[in-house]
Image: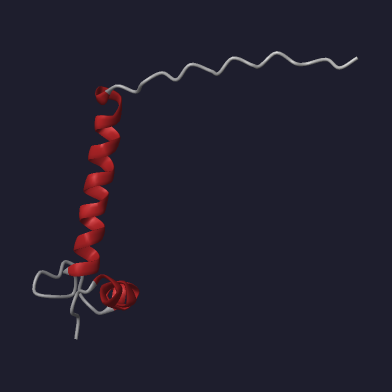
């Protein structure tokens, strides 16, 4: 005698409100802008950190993203 299992009910998916997502979107947006600044512009005319350390850390990323650096 074969027994068949009843299909399990799919869990209900609750939508996430825009109010819940907005702080995280703002945080990651600012984080991406800071990262873009360090990869694209730091150690140039608008350098915030003296020396070449930041340039050396992001050098390959600059070439990968198409930013000129030398």
Residue 58 position by quadrant: bottom left
Is residue 24 toward the left or the right of residue 37 in the image?
right
Q: Say if 67 sits above or below 16 in the image.
A: below
The residue at the point 64 percent across, 16 percent down is 8
Q: Which of 26 and 43 lies nearest the eye of the viewer? A: 26
Is residue 36 toward the left or the right of residue 13 in the image?
left
The residue at the point 29 percent across, 30 percent down is 21
Is residue 53 toward the left or the right of residue 48 in the image?
right
Q: Say if 28 sits above or below 58 in the image.
A: above
The structure's colour scheme is secondary structure
Work out which residue is located at the far front of the displayed protein and give it: 1
Q: Quadrant of the N terminus?
A: top right
Please state the horizontal and vertical placement of residue 51, each as a whole percent of the image.
23, 78
Q: Quadrant of the C terminus?
A: bottom left
Residue 48 position by quadrant: bottom left
Q: Which of 58 and 10 lies nearest the eye of the viewer? A: 10
The residue at the point 25 percent across, 23 percent down is 19
Residue 59 position by quadrant: bottom left
Work out which residue is located at the far left of the displayed protein and give it: 45
Q: Which of 4 and 60 lies nearest the eye of the viewer? A: 4
């Amino acid at each position: 005698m074969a027994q068949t299992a009843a299909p399990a009910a799919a869990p209900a998916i609750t939508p996430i409100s825009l109010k819940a997502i907005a702080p995280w979107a703002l945080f990651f947006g600012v984080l991406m802008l800071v990262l873009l600044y360090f990869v694209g512009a730091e150690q140039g005319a608008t350098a915030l950190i003296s020396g070449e350390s930041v340039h050396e850390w992001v050098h390959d990323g600059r070439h990968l993203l198409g930013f000129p650096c030398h």
